[in-house]
Amino acid sequence: MSLMETTTLPLHRIANALDGCFNLTEERILSSETRAMVFKAIDQPSVENWLNARSIIVSRSMTLWQAVIAAGAHPKDIPTGLQIIEAIEWTQP
């Protein structure tokens, strides 16, 4: 594994998705703390990490949990890192 990869996905893909998150007023919304929570949920999927990250707003009108469900994940499952990143990418224009 190179320095530019996590255990699951390339860092540039994660960074690009997180950089594209906006709120209702189209301002970039992820502070370094919330970014770290989402990153941890992507890189180390677990119940605890998912519960910490799922309520973070990732688009003008969706939380991370809503985006993951809209992108096709089952509501009761803990999403994989790939499912989380694809859900964030799905919310972006």
Image: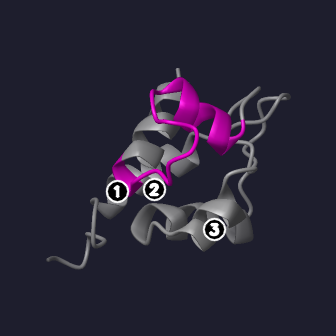
Residue farthest along the right direction in this orientation: 25
Residue 92 appears in the rendering: no
Residue 71 magenta-drawn?
Answer: yes
Picture residue at 40% right of the left edge, 44% below the top: 83
Q: Is residue 19 above or below residue 47?
A: above
Picture residue at 78% right of the left edge, 35% below the top: 23
Horizontal side of 64 relative to 40 (left or right) equals right
Residue 80: x percent and y percent? 39, 54
The circle drawn on residue 12 is: 1
Circle 1 Cα neighbour tier, 10 Å, few/some/many (<14 / 14–19 / ≥20) = few
- Is label 2 in a helix, a strand or a loop? helix
The boundaries of the magenta stretch are 63-82
Picture residue at 74% right of the left edge, 50% below the top: 56
- Is label 1 in a helix, a strand or a loop? helix
Dot 1 or dot 3, earlier in sequence: 1
Q: Which residue is mark 3?
A: 37
The N terminus, quarter of image = bottom left
- Exactly how many numbered labels are in the figure? 3
- Foreground mark, 3 or 2, reads 3
The quarter holding residue 15 reads bottom left
Circle 3 Cα neighbour tier, 10 Å, few/some/many (<14 / 14–19 / ≥20) = many
Q: Is 83 in front, or is 38?
A: 83
Tell me the kind of residue under disc 1. His
Q: Is residue 88 above or below residue 12?
A: above
Q: Which residue is mark 2?
A: 15
Tell me the kind of residue under disc 3. Met
Tell me the kind of residue under disc 2. Ala
Residue 57 appears in the rendering: yes
Residue 66: x percent and y percent? 66, 33
Residue 6: x percent and y percent? 31, 71
